[in-house]
Image (spheres, rainbow, N blue to C red):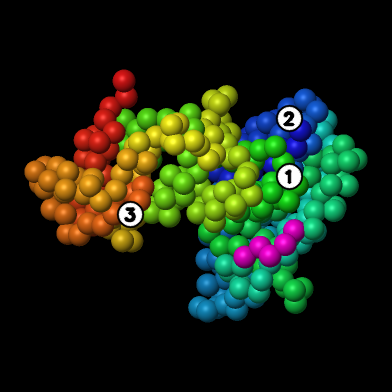
């Protein structure tokens, strides 16, 4: 079995969390799986590097910013390999370009064009865990590039597709996918599985659990995703293309602060959902400034100050409290 595991920055912030993440990967390796680990920069490293660059120059060169920001993930990859080795696992770290990730030349928001995973395959053939720096690759001109927000998720899914991995596990600080952000709506309900189409709509309209580009890649290459917590033994949530009979009529609610919209997603959601949502919100004292719908989702625009109230109301009215 081949597994790609991705650890986000919150899962790698400090020695204790690094060791916990390494233990998860080491256990999979000891069970006989071929393991590729993709890592983000730990904690606030990327923001700190960007702040330092802008203290030195208000408008730093995009090329040099990519060269600078990519070092955060390289630190994480080397440290993860060191920790894995310290607990008895065989491991080797790779930068994005060493892993064969080739991109276009769009500094700061590059797209992956191809992956040549020969070095990763050789490492796994030699019984090693391949630890890859996420969020980066190399352009045809030989420049380091970064993939933009959510780039490490994209790296993990792209590698899973290139390696024909059995699954791609995304480890973060939440234990699965919920009907809303549980840090904002405590009554949000955890989902054992969610249809890829619904996850993509949620990701496009404000949910930060997975990046839209990563979900699109997973759909395109039939990669099964599983969102898991680095801090608990929860089985997490699976993201896969489901038959209509298993696709949830109501999958979740999210918000986009920049657009001041609340979006309800699910198989049963569409144009006919809007009047009920509008009346329900306005009856509760939240005027709806605009509304629109497409297959599988409905969007409500409200005043910025009422955005959270609108999200809470929609979740309570439509999805309800846990049983």
Q: In the image, is 159 to the left or to the right of 60?
A: right
C-alpha span from label 2 to label 1? 17 Å
Q: Nearer the viewer, mark 2 or mark 3?
A: 3
Location of residue 261 (image quadrant): bottom left
Q: Is residue 207 above or below residue 248?
A: below
Residues at discs 2 and 1 in contact (Cβ within 8 Å): no
How would you rate the neighbour count of disc 2 (Cα within 10 Å): few for under 14, some for 14-19, many for 20 or more? some
The numbered mark, 2 or 1, whose residue comes first in the sequence reads 2
Q: In the image, is 55 to the left or to the right of 23?
A: left
- Residue 277 visible in the snapshot: yes
Q: Is residue 225 above or below residue 292?
A: above
Residue 105 x %, y %: 66, 74
Q: Nearer the viewer, residue 243 or 279?
A: 243
- Residue corresponding to mark 1: 164
Q: How many marks?
A: 3
Q: Nearer the viewer, residue 178 or 49?
A: 178
Highlighted range, magenta: 111-115
How would you rate the neighbour count of disc 3 (Cα within 10 Å): few for under 14, some for 14-19, many for 20 or more? few
Residue 87 x %, y %: 79, 31
Residue 292 x %, y %: 26, 57
Q: Secondary structure at mark 2?
A: helix
Residue at screen point 48% across, 40% down? 195
Q: Nearer the viewer, mark 3 or mark 1?
A: 3
Q: Is residue 1 above or below residue 94?
A: above
Q: Main secondary structure of the magenta part?
A: strand
Q: Which mark is residue 28?
A: 2
- Residue corresponding to mark 3: 294
Q: Nearer the viewer, mark 2 or mark 1?
A: 1
Location of residue 284 (image quadrant): top left
Residue at screen point 90% across, 40% down? 126
Q: Secondary structure at mark 3?
A: strand
């Amino acid at each position: 079995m081949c597994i790609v595991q991705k650890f986000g920055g919150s899962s790698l912030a400090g020695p204790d969390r690094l060791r916990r993440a390494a233990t998860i990967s080491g256990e999979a390796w000891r069970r006989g799986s071929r393991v590729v680990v993709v890592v983000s920069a730990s904690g606030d490293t990327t923001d700190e590097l960007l702040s330092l660059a802008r203290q030195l120059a208000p408008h730093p060169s995009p090329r040099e910013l990519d060269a600078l920001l990519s070092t955060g993930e390289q630190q994480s990859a080397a440290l993860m390999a060191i920790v894995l080795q310290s607990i008895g696992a065989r491991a080797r770290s790779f930068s994005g370009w060493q892993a064969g990730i080739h991109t276009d030349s769009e500094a700061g928001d590059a797209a992956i064009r191809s992956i040549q995973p020969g070095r990763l395959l050789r490492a796994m053939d030699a019984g090693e865990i391949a630890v890859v720096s996420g969020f980066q690759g190399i352009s045809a001109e030989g420049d380091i590039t970064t993939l933009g927000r959510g780039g490490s998720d994209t790296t993990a899914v792209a590698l899973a597709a290139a390696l024909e991995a059995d699954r791609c596990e995304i480890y973060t600080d939440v234990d699965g996918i919920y009907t809303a952000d549980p840090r904002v709506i405590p009554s949000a309900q955890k989902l054992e599985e969610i249809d890829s189409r619904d996850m993509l709509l949620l990701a496009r309209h404000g949910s930060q659990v997975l990046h839209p580009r990563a979900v699109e890649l997973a759909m395109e290459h039939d990669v099964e995703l599983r969102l898991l917590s680095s801090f608990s033994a929860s089985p997490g949530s699976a993201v896969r293309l489901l038959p209509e009979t298993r696709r949830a009529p109501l999958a979740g609610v999210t918000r986009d602060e920049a657009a001041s919209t609340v979006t309800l997603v699910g198989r049963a959601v569409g144009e006919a959902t809007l009047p009920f949502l509008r009346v329900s919100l306005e009856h509760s004292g939240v005027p709806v400034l605009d509304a629109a719908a497409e297959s599988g989702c409905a969007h409500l625009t409200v005043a910025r100050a009422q955005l959270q109230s609108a999200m809470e109301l929609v979740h309570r009215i439509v999805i309800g409290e846990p049983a």
